[in-house]
Image: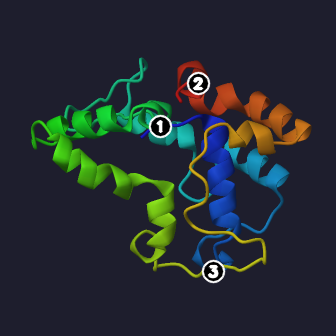
């Protein structure tokens, strides 16, 4: 899955800022996080390095066993994304009845209602009283909406250094 870099950064900030520091969580501000994220100083390293480990310069998978699904494509055409994934993993064509069973289980509403199936149990979560849930919104564009002007400046400055020109445009 590839997604807008700002949305990845924003989502990861929400995730790590609500995760216990003992389990790899983050205690700094969003602005500090954006800076650290751009510099690859966040848990799991630089996002651009992650992308480069499985995508070539054109954004294609390096290994035929991988399938790159773009988050915005999935949001626009969940049925197409499910059909493409089924073909890729060798299931073949999915019937309309099967889609009727599968697609509702892929919604944020379903995931929130069944949070125990999705929320990692391997970490402790910090309740900050802000209503955080591991499954948050599933929106596109929240990174840009939630970044301050300072965050946006820092992000743009580090974007090409961390990810390279091509990787910064993957959404």
Where is residue 77 shown, x and y percent of the image? Answer: 39, 32
Q: Is residue 25 visible in this depiction of the protein?
A: yes
- The residue identified by callout 3 is 22
Q: Looking at the image, is mark 3 or mark 2 earlier in the sequence?
A: 3
Q: Looking at the image, is mark 3 or mark 1 earlier in the sequence?
A: 3
Q: Looking at the image, is mark 1 or mark 2 earlier in the sequence?
A: 1
In this rendering, would 134 be left or right of 94?
Answer: right
Q: Quick one: quadrant of the N terminus? A: top left
Asked which quadrant contains residue 20, the reply is: bottom right
- The residue identified by callout 1 is 75
Instruction: Evaluate if marks 1 and 2 touch, with contact meaning CB atoms under 8 Å apart.
Output: no
* Cα separation between marks 3 and 2: 32 Å
Asked which quadrant contains residue 163, the reply is: top right
Looking at the rendered image, the disc whose residue lies closer to the viewer, 3 or 1, is 1
Return the residue nearer the eye: 170 or 26.
Answer: 170
Q: Helix or strand or loop: what does disc 1 sit on?
A: helix
- The residue identified by callout 2 is 164
């Amino acid at each position: 899955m590839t997604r807008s870099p700002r949305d990845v950064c924003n989502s990861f900030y929400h995730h790590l800022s609500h995760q216990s520091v003992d389990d790899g969580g983050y205690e700094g501000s969003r602005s500090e996080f954006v800076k650290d994220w751009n510099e690859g100083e966040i848990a799991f390293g630089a996002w651009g390095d992650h992308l480069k480990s499985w995508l070539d310069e054109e954004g294609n998978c390096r290994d035929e066993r991988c399938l790159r699904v773009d988050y915005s494509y999935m949001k626009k055409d969940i049925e197409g994304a499910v059909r493409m994934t089924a073909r890729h993993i060798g299931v073949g064509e999915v019937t309309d009845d099967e889609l009727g069973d599968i697609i509702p289980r892929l919604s944020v509403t379903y995931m929130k209602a069944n949070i125990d199936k999705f929320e990692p149990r391997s970490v402790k979560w910090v309740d900050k009283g802000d209503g955080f849930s591991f499954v948050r919104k599933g929106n596109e564009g929240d990174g840009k909406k939630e970044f301050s002007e300072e965050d946006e400046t820092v992000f743009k400055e580090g974007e090409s250094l961390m990810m390279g020109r091509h990787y910064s445009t993957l959404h």
